[in-house]
Amino acid sequence: MKVLKIIGLMGLLSWVACSTQKAADAAAPADSVTAAPAAVDLPDTGPAPSFDSARAMQYVKEIVAFGPRPIGSTNHKKVEDYILNHLQGDLVEVDDFIANTPDGKFPVKNIIAKYPGTRDGILMIASHYDTVYSLRNTSFVGANDGASSSALLLEIANQLRGKQRDGYSVWLIWDDAEEAMRQWSDTDSLYGVRHLVEKWQKDGTLKKTKAFLLEDMIGDADLNIEREQNSTPWLEDMIYQAAKRLGYQSHFFGRTIPMEDDHKPFLMRGIPSADLIDFDYGYGNVFWHTPEDTVDKLSPKSLEIVGMVTLETVRMVDKKH
Ligand code: 1BN
Ligand code: ZN
């Protein structure tokens, strides 16, 4: 385990790229969104959330521009560095290990950014950033599957950074090796989060974890977040309440389906968990795990809806008990 403030040599090396990014960030406030203060019934837990959807969309494009990012690849390493570069100055834990897979041993790297709060407890928000290994020699870039949610977390980091949280600590997790190498099974999938729950069970982190929110495939322009059948009912209800408060409920819970995803190992250890996923990507989900999963199918508005609902849910969990 490495816990570090990301500064020093890496910061120096990435300075040029980063300052270019910062300039782009600074130039894009027009699409910033702030929740309406008076018209909706918001909990009184500090300032209303905001989310810069244009900046989030720019992150999606930049992640996708690296190309396919299966574990073990050069592109994967570039995306690791890209995420870490955006977290400079934040409290970051890197959890890296070697995974044993049906295709051999691969380095896996989970990246966790921690934003301390005043309440004792942790709220986790996660996204995987790898793409499907078996599609490594195609043009599959997972714009929706992996890039959209990872970009969403980068923008949430921007919103949390430098602010005193009047609530639980928030941990943002870019987890790795979610995808199966050959055929999805308990042992061939979720390599990154399975490693995290083992570690966090042993060191007491899980005991302190109040909720785990997973984001997956949240960028589809035609946004329909599922009610995921295995997720914790009170947390799902809270997400729907948050969506209603913001006027976004028409994009939530039109159908209920079971999904195996990164929230499963947390659920199995008794952590209240929810999977925010839209598993209807193109008619009949035809774009899922195909080279058709590209940026043109996505919308900044969808990122904003899920980002705002996530931040609102965080405020509601802060207030619980
Ligand atoms: C979601 C996106 N998943 C993989 N990429 C999880 C999943 C697991 C989806 C099994 C379908 C079946
Ligand atoms: Zn996938």
Image (cartoon, rainbow, N blue to C red):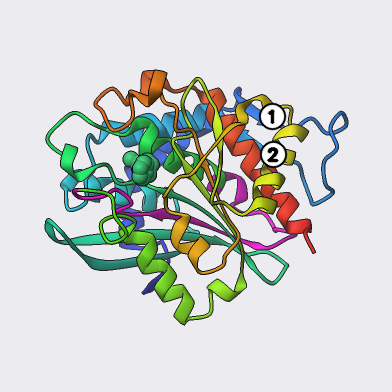
The magenta stretch spans which residues?
157-182
Label disc, if present, on residue 299 of the rendered structure: none
- Which type of secondary structure does the marked residue at label 1 adopt? helix
* Amino acid, disc 2: Tyr
Q: Quadrant of the C terminus?
A: bottom right
- Residue occupying image coordinates x 39% and y 22%: 284
* Front position in the image: 30 or 57: 57
Return the x and y of residue 256 as percentages of the image width and height: 56, 37
Which quadrant would residue 37 be assigned to in this image? top right
Q: Is residue 306 magenta?
A: no
Q: Are marks 1 and 2 in contact (CB under 8 Å)?
A: yes
- Residue occupying image coordinates x 17% and y 53%: 72
Q: As displayed, is residue 122 above or below residue 139?
A: below
Q: Kindly identify which residue carries mark 1.
A: 249
Label disc, if present, on residue 240 of the rendered structure: 2
Return the x and y of residue 214 as percentages of the image width and height: 51, 49
What is the CA distance from the residue labelled 1 to the residue labelled 2? 7 Å
Return the x and y of residue 313 as percentages of the image width and height: 68, 47
Residue 56 visible? The answer is yes
Q: Is residue 165 magenta?
A: yes
Mark 2: C-beta under 8 Å from nearest atom of ligand 1: no
- Residue occupying image coordinates x 38% and y 26%: 285
Q: Quadrant of the N terminus?
A: bottom left
Which quadrant would residue 20 be assigned to in this image? top left
- Locate residue 118 relative to residue 106 in the image: left or right: right
* Front position in the image: 190 or 45: 190
Count residues near mark 1 (Cα–Cα under 10 Å), then give few for <14, some for 14-19, many for 20+: some
